Amino acid sequence: MHAVFVEVDVEDTVSVDEARDRLQANAPRIARENGARAAYWLAPQGGRGVSVAIFDTEDEAQKLANQFHVGESPRNAPPGITFRTVEVREVLASL
């Protein structure tokens, strides 16, 4: 298994409620359509949000990761959110 690990920068001006609504309306669907078996988006803390999406193969994970670019905003995100980190990592253990 492989994971797409993503960190985003979240400016103080971003409405967490608006970001949450947009995230819930779009991110799970996009992850599922790209083959994710599971995915988690953590609430921002200290101006940083984190997500992890799990895939069966490295190729599937890389396909999703290639859609994200450091310094750019996620699709459908409110202004003030930008990608800080986008990495594909092997999953060493899971529950």
Image: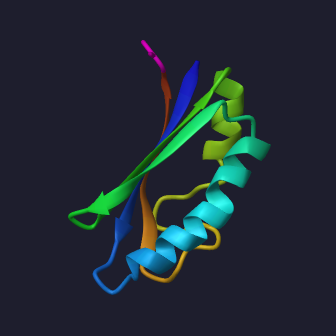
> Main structural element of the magenta stretch: helix, strand or loop?
loop
Q: Among all residues in the image, which is located at the extreme top?
A: 93
Q: Residue at x 44, y 16 (%)?
A: 95
Residue 69 in picture, x, y percent from top left: 55, 58
Q: Write down the quadrant of residue 24 in the picture.
A: bottom right
Q: Which residues are magenta?
A: 91-95
Residue 19 in picture, x, y percent from top left: 49, 73
Q: Is residue 78 above or below residue 6?
A: below
Q: Among all residues in the image, which is located at the extreme bottom?
A: 13
Q: On the rendered structure, is 52 left or right of 43?
A: right
Q: Is residue 89 magenta?
A: no
Q: Is residue 78 above or below residue 75?
A: below
Residue nearer the viewer, 59 or 39:
39
Q: Residue at x 64, y 73 (%)?
A: 76
Q: How many marks?
A: 0
Q: Residue at x 56, y 40 (%)?
A: 39
Residue nearer the viewer, 33 or 84:
33
Q: On the rendered structure, is 64 left or right of 14?
A: right
Q: Among all residues in the image, which is located at the extreme right?
A: 33
Q: Residue at x 58, y 18 (%)?
A: 1
Q: In this figure, which colouring scheme has been used for the structure?
A: rainbow
Q: Among all residues in the image, which is located at the extreme left?
A: 46
Q: Is residue 59 above or below residue 76?
A: above
Residue 72 in picture, x, y percent from top left: 52, 69
Residue 94 in picture, x, y percent from top left: 45, 16
Q: Is residue 4 above or below residue 90?
A: below
